[in-house]
Image (tube, rainbow, N blue to C red):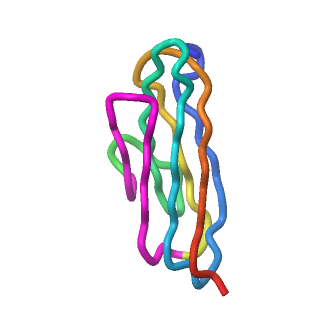
Amino acid sequence: SSGTPQATHAFDVAPGTTTLRVALTGSEDGGSDFDLYLRQGAPPTAAAYDCRDLGPNQFGYCEIADPAAGTWYAQAVRAAGVGAYHATITTFGRD
């Protein structure tokens, strides 16, 4: 909502992970436009991130090859409109 313009979610990446993918899908209701930021070790900011997708719609996608193990942060930032979003975090390559 306009009262909550962003949300940050922490998650862990295991040692041996070869690919990290984060996908953001926003609700089409309310003309939503969300931006996705991804960062390892600390919450992302507009100036500090490992990946970002500033597309003009409710979708965002980041892929990191050979991500560092440890805590990562995904942040959804409302650029316009209102509505819900769904974040999907997928890792590959862990034994």
Residue 66 within the segment the image draws in magenta: yes
Count all numbered tags in the image, as a single digit.
0
Q: Judge by depth and name the residue closer to the eye, 80 or 72.
A: 80
Q: The N terminus lies in which quarter of the figure?
A: top right
Q: The C terminus lies in which quarter of the figure?
A: bottom right
Residue 27, position as x, y percentages in the image: 56, 25
Q: Judge by depth and name the residue closer to the eye, 30 or 78.
A: 30
Residue 92, position as x, y percentages in the image: 57, 74
Q: Is residue 62 left or right of residue 5?
A: left
Q: Judge by depth and name the residue closer to the eye, 22 or 29.
A: 29
Q: Is 27 rendered above or below residue 88?
A: above
Q: Residue at x 51, y 60 (%)?
A: 21
Find the residue positioned furthest to the front: 28
Q: Residue at x 42, y 18 (%)?
A: 80
Q: Residue at x 52, y 21 (%)?
A: 28
Q: Residue at x 52, y 12 (%)?
A: 30
Among the 4 quarters of the image, the one containing residue 47: top left
Q: Is residue 91 left or right of residue 61?
A: right
Residue 91 within the segment the image draws in magenta: no
Residue 19, position as x, y percentages in the image: 49, 72
Residue 68, position as x, y percentages in the image: 51, 75
Q: Judge by depth and name the residue closer to the eye, 9 or 80.
A: 80
Q: Is 39 rendered above or below residue 65?
A: above
State which region is magenta. Answer: 49-68
